[in-house]
Structure formats: structure tokens, C-alpha cells
Image: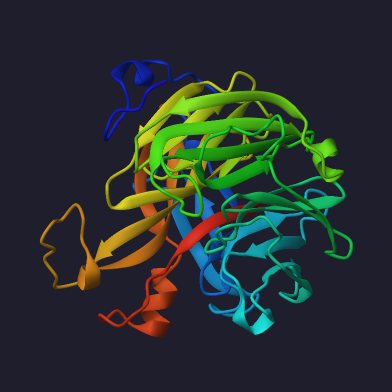
């Protein structure tokens, strides 16, 4: 399916299907609660207790907001949250930048969600063959035994980490395998299926060979791998697909399968895609405003809704941007927000909820020197 410059073809909207039982009549009666762990560039996770009531004007309410530290913004900026499938008290994580205090290595680790204690922190050297390591781990999946953080380096790679002791078993590249798209790409991401038998990898085709990331050309490659083989350091392709989106603005970041494994919600910068997990075809697509950029998308337990993370530009108080659709420089502060998408209606509903600036404003201020709040991925323990 083809996405237009700032939207999707009208025919695409007509293909939105009823995946759950939610609708306008039942939305007021529905309620979800849980703890969301939202990754931040400051070396911590926002620990947000949320209540979701789809029928309300602001459907997502943050009833308590704390943070879970794994380091600081220099050593442990993170994009990745991954709660263990079997033990929901363990959070695995990985870091986005090279740590100058650890001989320019990255970190993978695990944290006890009950105590907030970092149980293990392993520093990993960037593997040979990487041309550009400006951007590192951003997404991940898992099997019963392994944690699989995925690097946005060029070329990208998947690390196979033993959950028991966080030791490195393999570094897996797609180049030269049956998963090789044989084209330049910008950023690799991915996720495991709920039964952990499949491992989805996404690649954004770009226009630049060699060391540079280049610019995305509007082609999102989806490659489903066998998870068991990946744990052995091997690449076994189960199926492939390509989605056509918007050049430059559409960049596949993180994604989740629905809990029944039938669908994939893919946060693609300017578009939220709902994808058939078997055919890898687009079912629905919903664009967001130019002030927003989607970075993750997780289904509610009944698969009726999707909670998406957004990096949202908030215009500073008293400032009138030269271009309201594209505020720049000190005209705005970046906030991290949660948005709710109704699967049956095929659209976002209600107002977004902040999970970053409510703390940042209090602790760091709102003047022109205040830092941006930059979120990325999330994982959730639902009540």
C-alpha cells in the first residue's frame, strides 16, 4: 500500500478492519491499567503508572510518574525497554551511544523492577565490520534464553545475549545472508512475536552507500526470521515484505505484535502502520501531525487499542514560531507523549498524555536552556 506525502491513499482508510470488539458504544466502559517503562536519553526510564479510559477526552492518565535510573545521559542513554516474558519483574535494556567512560563501548543490562536495582551491566565493544557507530542499540526481542538487542549502526546487527549472565554469544549481521536486501539502509529495528518463535526485523531503505546513513526513500523492508536459529547465531528467513511509505519522513522505528500474534503495530515516524503479521501487508495507516514523531507502539491486552510513544514539539510559552508547523531552535521543547489509537475505528482518539516534561519542567525548568525530553521505546506490565 502507498502512503501519500502527508497522508495515505483514501483507499487505505477503507481497508481498516474490525480487529477487536471496541467501538464508540463500548469505549466509555473500557478501562486499562498498568505500569509503562518508557526509555529516555537521560540514562533512565520513565516509570509511569497509567489508567486508560478510551471514551474520555484525554484517554490516557498518568496517575504516578517516577524514574528508573540505569546510569546517566553520558554513559547510559537508552531507547530500549524489554520486560522478560516469563519473569515480569526483570527489565532488560541496552544503550544508544558509545560510553566514553567504558572505552567507547555500549551497555546491555537488566534491572529488578521491584527494587530498581541494576542486576547486571555488561559493556560490549562494537563488532568489526561496523562502518558507522554514531547510533547504537534501539530495539530488541527475546527468546526464553536470550535477549536480542538490535543496533542502528551501519551496517546494523543483532546481539545474542544470554539472559542468565548477560554474556555475549553472537553478533549477527544480515549482510551476505538470505535476509540481505542488497540495498543501503538507515536503521535496523525489530521485535519477537508473543510466542517467541518469530523475530521481525525492519530496515529503512536509503539512498546512500558506504559509511553514511543517507535519506530514507519510502521503502520499509520487513523480514521475519526464525528465533531459534537466531539464538544460534544463524539467519533463517521465514518470509519478507516491503511497505511503501513517505520518503524522508517515514522511518520505521519500534513495533509490537498483537497479543494474538496476528498483527503488527509499527511506529514509522509520521505514520502508525497496522500490518498483517502473516502477509506483511498494510491493513491500516494513520498519519500524525508534523509536530509529532512516533517511536513505539504496543497493543492493549485485548488488542483493541494501541498505545504509541511520540516525540512531540511543544512550543515554549510566550513564543510565536516563524513556522508553527515546524518550530525550530529555541522555539520549542521536546516532550515525550503517549497517544491512543483505536484499532476498530482506525484512528487516534482523544488528547495525548505527557510522560516526560511534567518531571523535566519541575526539575530542570522551562527556559531556553532547559534540555529536551527525548523518549523512544516502551514496555508495559498490565494490571
Which quadrant holds residue 48?
Answer: bottom right
Measuring 33% from the left and 51% from the top, which residue is drawn there? 292
Quadrant in which the N terminus appears: top left
* Closer-to-camera residue (140/115): 140
Judge whether residue 312 can be spotted in this image: yes
Measuring 58% from the left and 33% from the top, which residue is drawn there? 182
Measuring 28% from the left and 52% from the top, which residue is drawn there? 291
* Closer-to-camera residue (119/206): 206
**Residue projecting furthest to the front:** 210
Residue 214 spot, x, y in % from top left: 41, 48
Judge whether residue 58 can be spotted in this image: no
Colouring scheme, one of rainbow, by chain, secondary structure, one colour: rainbow
The total of numbered circles placed on residues is 0
Tell me: 149 left or right of 10. right
Which quadrant holds residue 377?
Answer: bottom right
Relative to 14, residue 66 above or below: below
Tell me: 160 left or right of 372. right
Tell me: 80 left or right of 84. left
Residue 60 spot, x, y in % from top left: 45, 52
Relative to 79, residue 31 above or below: above
Residue 133 spot, x, y in % from top left: 57, 62
Relative to 230, residue 38 above or below: below
Residue 361 spot, x, y in % from top left: 36, 77
Measuring 49% from the left and 37% from the top, which residue is drawn there? 29
Amino acid at each position: 500500500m502507498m502512503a501519500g506525502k502527508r497522508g495515505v491513499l483514501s483507499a487505505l482508510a477503507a481497508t481498516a478492519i474490525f480487529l477487536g470488539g471496541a467501538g464508540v458504544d463500548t469505549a466509555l466502559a473500557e478501562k486499562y491499567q498498568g505500569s509503562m517503562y518508557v526509555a529516555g536519553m537521560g540514562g533512565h526510564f520513565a516509570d509511569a503508572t497509567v489508567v486508560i479510559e478510551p471514551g474520555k477526552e484525554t484517554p490516557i492518565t498518568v496517575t504516578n510518574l517516577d524514574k528508573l535510573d540505569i546510569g546517566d545521559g553520558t554513559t547510559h542513554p537508552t531507547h530500549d525497554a524489554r520486560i522478560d516474558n516469563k519473569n515480569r519483574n526483570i527489565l532488560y535494556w541496552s544503550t544508544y551511544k558509545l560510553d566514553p567512560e567504558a572505552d567507547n563501548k555500549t551497555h546491555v543490562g537488566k534491572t529488578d523492577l521491584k527494587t530498581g536495582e541494576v542486576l547486571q551491566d555488561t559493556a560490549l565493544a562494537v563488532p568489526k565490520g561496523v562502518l558507522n557507530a554514531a547510533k547504537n542499540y534501539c530495539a530488541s526481542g527475546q527468546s526464553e534464553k536470550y535477549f536480542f538487542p538490535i543496533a542502528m549502526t551501519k551496517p546494523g546487527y543483532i546481539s545474542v545475549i544470554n539472559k542468565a549472565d548477560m554474556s555475549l554469544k553472537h553478533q549477527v549481521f544480515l549482510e551476505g545472508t538470505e535476509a540481505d536486501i542488497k540495498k543501503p539502509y538507515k536503521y535496523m529495528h525489530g521485535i519477537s512475536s508473543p510466542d517467541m518463535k518469530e523475530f521481525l526485523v525492519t530496515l529503512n531503505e536509503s539512498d546512500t552507500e558506504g559509511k553514511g546513513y543517507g535519506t530514507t526513500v519510502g521503502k520499509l523492508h520487513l523480514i521475519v526470521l526464525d528465533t531459534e536459529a537466531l539464538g544460534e547465531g544463524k539467519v533463517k528467513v521465514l518470509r519478507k515484505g516491503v511497505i511503501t511509505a513517505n520518503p524522508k519522513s517515514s522511518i520505521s522505528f519500534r513495533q509490537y505484535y498483537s497479543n494474538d500474534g496476528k498483527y503488527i503495530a509499527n511506529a514509522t515516524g509520521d505514520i502508525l502502520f497496522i500490518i498483517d503479521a502473516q502477509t506483511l501487508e498494510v491493513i491500516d495507516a494513520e498519519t500524525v501531525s508534523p509536530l509529532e514523531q512516533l517511536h513505539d507502539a504496543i497493543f492493549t491486552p485485548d488488542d483493541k487499542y494501541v498505545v504509541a510513544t511520540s516525540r512531540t514539539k511543544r512550543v515554549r510559552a510566550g513564543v510565536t514560531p516563524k513556522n508553527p508547523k515546524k518550530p525550530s531552535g529555541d522555539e520549542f521543547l521536546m516532550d515525550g507523549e503517549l497517544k491512543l489509537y483505536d484499532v476498530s475505528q482506525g484512528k487516534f482518539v482523544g488528547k495525548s498524555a505527557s510522560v516526560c516534561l511534567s518531571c523535566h519542567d519541575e526539575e530542570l525548568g522551562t527556559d531556553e536552556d532547559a534540555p529536551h525530553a527525548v523518549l523512544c521505546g516502551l514496555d508495559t506490565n498490565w494490571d
